[in-house]
Amino acid sequence: MGADASGGAVVLVHGLFLSPKWMWPLARDLKRAGFGPIWNLGYGRGPDLSTICARLGEELRHKRAAHDPAAPIHAVGLSMGGLILRRLHADGALPAHPAAHYVTLGTPHAGAARAAWGVRRFPRLTRVVYGPTLQELVPGSPFLTDLPQLPIDQLSCVYSGAGTPQGRSRVVPGDDDGVVEVASACVEGATSVLVPAVHHYWISLRRASRAATVQALQAGVARAASARHG
């Protein structure tokens, strides 16, 4: 999807072991809401997050070459895709802009307790299936420790949970969406948007969470415009 629209360009990045197909419905919704071009980036398995980020950074720089350098570029990251956005922003591939807004969907900003459980319980299997990537999602990993956050006042965190002290997963402490704990999906100081009762794997596909994402992006853009003209 490449035609320009008034809402501004949006970068989409999917989660681990998924594909850009997981973001197609959201891309369509954003296009209908007046955003564009929509750059739906994809990546494969491994070898590690730093390499994935470097490859996507080069792809994004290539796409930006024909884009107005003075215009903001918004972004939406699904699960691990939100961590990738943080790296792309820190490295300048996703350029800082006061009018840009960023939305993460079920992103384990502080790491995923489920990843820590899997690495601890099935160390060999997780290395074979995920390579080093799952280890990088463990809370306190070097990748997460060195990962700068997106600008807090330009960030919205869309998340889900069961709304109970113990969420969907027995191996995740506190409330969660079946994979990522609420405490990690939300960032202190950022705008938090709850979409109740949506499992982690479907948060980019369900109509309610897609609508919440579009609305969060629209609200962030409106706040930035108001601040500039107020």
Image: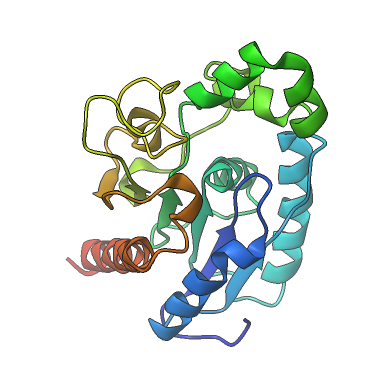
Residue 122: name its quadrant: top right
Q: How far across and down, in percent of the image, does residue 57 sit? A: 72, 52
Residue 63: name its quadrant: bottom right
Q: How far across and down, in percent of the image, does residue 30 sit? A: 44, 75
- From the viewer's perspective, is residue 78 above or below residue 147? below
Quadrant, the N terminus: bottom right
Give the residue drawn at x 67%, y 58%: 19
- From the viewer's perspective, is residue 28 above or below residue 142? below
Image side of residue 211 versus residue 171, left or right: left
Give the residue drawn at x 30%, y 42%: 190
Quadrant, the C terminus: bottom left
Q: Residue furthest left?
A: 230
Image side of residue 159 versus residue 76, left or right: left
- From the viewer's perspective, is residue 79 above or below residue 12? above
Between residue 92 and residue 143, name the one nearer to us: 143
Q: Residue furthest top?
A: 120
Q: How far across and down, in percent of the image, does residue 148 sit? A: 52, 32
Give the residue drawn at x 63%, y 83%: 2
Between residue 133 and residue 92, name the one nearer to us: 133
Q: How far across and down, in percent of the image, does residue 182 sit? A: 33, 34
Between residue 109 and residue 21, name the one nearer to us: 21
